[in-house]
Image (cartoon, rainbow, N blue to C red):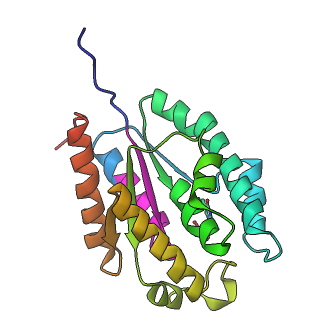
Amino acid sequence: MIKTMQQTLFIVLDGIDGAGTTTHSKLLAGFLSLKGLKTYLTREPSSSEIGKLLRIYLKDERIPASTDALLFAADRVLHYKNEIKKKLEEGYIVISDRYIESSIAYQSSQSDEITIEWIENLNLFAGEPDLTIILDIDPKISLSRKNQEFLEKFEDTSLLDKVRQVYLTRAEKLGYSIINTNNIIELVQTEIQEVVLNKLKEKGIGIKK
Ligand code: TYD
């Protein structure tokens, strides 16, 4: 029997605050739609009740990192089962602005007691992406662009330096593409598109020229 190749792709853009995951996820979704692909854009924390609670906790220093890790994992499993998996089954290309690598990088950087292995275990029921792209920037550059009054609890240069190292180490270990985003948006986006186009080709997913 000839097995037909799955015509969908689950893409994740991840990276430290200010690296541009939101901007580039939106641009990528627009690009893929223009290429004639059914595209679904989503983000984490998700729009679930747990995701809403997490957005409040992101501004609250009293919440322990372990609680954040547990809630992010709970939100992610729900997000995957109820949203991402469904859309993939309907034939959409799904793009998620952040996913499990955010939990690994952020929560493990906040406490020595939190291991990457524990976070991986918590996230066992969240399906794996086909492609993870890490957007990378020096936190000194990214934070200087933000309004200092509205920074969330993780938006601190020394924490983000640590978080960034975890992203880069994981990317090297797992073969994720790393794209430096300290450049003109259009150029960065073109680099992201090239990585995605290669993956589409590899999966045999055709696009409009
Ligand atoms: P962000 O994606 O920047 O959203 P917004 O643009 O609305 O500020 O913020 C999400 C924050 O949550 C970011 O600081 C990273 C953090 N985060 C974690 O710590 N763990 C996770 O698992 C996820 C998904 C996000």
Q: Quadrant of ligand 1?
A: bottom right
Q: Is residue 18 magenta?
A: yes
Residue located at (74% from left, 62% from top): 66
- Asked if residue 80 is positioned above or below residue 163 in the image, the reply reads above
Name the side, left or right, on which 14 lies relative to 65: left
Counting every numbered tag in the picture gives 0
- Asked if residue 63 is positioned above or below residue 82 in the image, the reply reads below
Q: Position of residue 208 (x, y in %)?
A: 20, 40
Camera-side residue: 154 or 190? Answer: 154
Q: Position of residue 128 (x, y in %)?
A: 47, 42
Q: Position of residue 21 (x, y in %)?
A: 46, 65
Q: Quadrant of residue 173?
A: bottom left
Q: Is residue 185 magenta?
A: no
Residue located at (70% from left, 78% from top): 153
Magenta residues, start to end = 9-30
Residue located at (53% from left, 79% from top): 162
Name the side, left or right, on which 14 lies relative to 50: left
| Outermost residue to the left | 209
Quadrant of the drawing holding the C terminus: top left
Camera-side residue: 129 or 152? Answer: 129
Quadrant of the drawing holding the N terminus: top left
Residue located at (40% from left, 70% from top): 168
- Asked if residue 96 is positioned above or below residue 171 in the image, the reply reads above
Camera-side residue: 175 or 132? Answer: 175
Q: Position of residue 204 (x, y in %)?
A: 22, 33
Q: Quadrant of residue 135?
A: bottom left
| Residue 47 showing in the rendered view | no
| Residue 80 showing in the rendered view | yes
